[in-house]
Amino acid sequence: MWQWFHKLGSPRWFYHISGKFLPWLALASVVLIVTGVVWGLAFAPQDARQGNSFRIIYIHVPASFLALAGYYVMAAAGAVGMIWKMKLADMVMVAAAPLGAALTFIALFTGAVWGKPTWGTYWIWDARITSMLVLLFLYIGIIALSRSFSTRETSARACAILALVGTVNIPIIYKSVDWWYTLHQPATIKMTGAPSMHPDMFKPLLVMILGFYCFYALVLLLNTRTEILLRESRTTWVKELAEPK
Amino acid sequence: MFQFENFDAFIAMGGHGPYVWAAYGLSLTIMAGLALAPLRRQRALLADLRQRLQAQRQRGQN
């Protein structure tokens, strides 16, 4: 177990192994997302009340899911890096921040353009939307913080602490629709019980969520690999990558 | 089953076309960028490293 842990902490080993997963993750992401987009846009039935604007759900919900799950990934990586001084975990944390920020932005943007025809407004300071905006600022804060220290150790520590403190926001986002019942509708998919959605509408959503998970894993690996190349550029194995014999 | 009568109706989305297409268009563009950016960055990093190594060797020879 410890040997495995030690190996996992080795950037070189990680770079090698992750390279084998990339093509499969890329293939799965493209197939699932293309299927989900075509299905959701053209073949899923329209919503009885919202009409076709409802089709935005197929981007909005998966992006929101991954924006939240991605925060846990980032905070957990930060904690592992801080506790066990694992360099690779710090790299994963830094890799997760811009990806999470982009997905949060997508969730907010699709929510805004969905809100206009449905609620009559692009933006409202509703609890769910405001706490998602806080999430976006947390991600941006981590990105800014990771670039503002000259030593990697201090930077990693500061980012990990901010990420861990920020996890307070995640349950607030989840529960916001129940605690403050305002404009945003409650969760469509619940861990317990059947989804409150017709199966013909739900199936493409499931495909999109799976596709977004694969896409998240793909980009997280790609960003981590970039970070590895950047930080390990003095090692022999990276020099050999730059100049293959 | 295809939900629209024809291609024009598909584009119009019953009047919600601009919202739906803006959401899908911008989101998918951002996602393509997210996947391509690290690949481009990696290629640039390795090319930069190769140049530095070559420069180092030339200095060593002189």
Image (cartoon, helix red, strand yellow):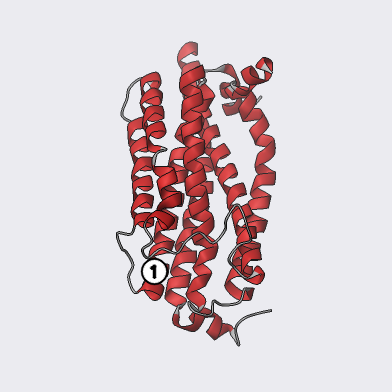
Query: Does B18 appear above or below A175?
Result: below
**Residue in view at x 36 percent, y 41 percent:** A138
Q: Amino acid at mark 1?
A: Gly
Which residue has dot 1 on it? A115
**Residue in view at x 43 percent, y 62 percent:** A110
Residue at the farthest bottom position: B5
Query: Does A206 appear above or below A19?
Result: below
Element assignment for label 1: helix
**Image location of residue A54, percent across then percent down:** 50, 72
Q: Quadrant of the N terminus of chain A?
A: top right
Horizontally, is A124 left or right of A81 in the view?
left
Horizontally, is A237 left or right of B42 in the view?
right
Residue sitting nearer the eye, A162 or A37: A162
**Image location of residue A40, percent across then percent down:** 60, 69
Can see residue B51?
no
Image quarter of residue A9: top right
Q: Quadrant of the C terminus of chain A?
A: top right
Chain letter of the residue carrying label 1: A
**Image location of residue A37, percent across then percent down:** 59, 65
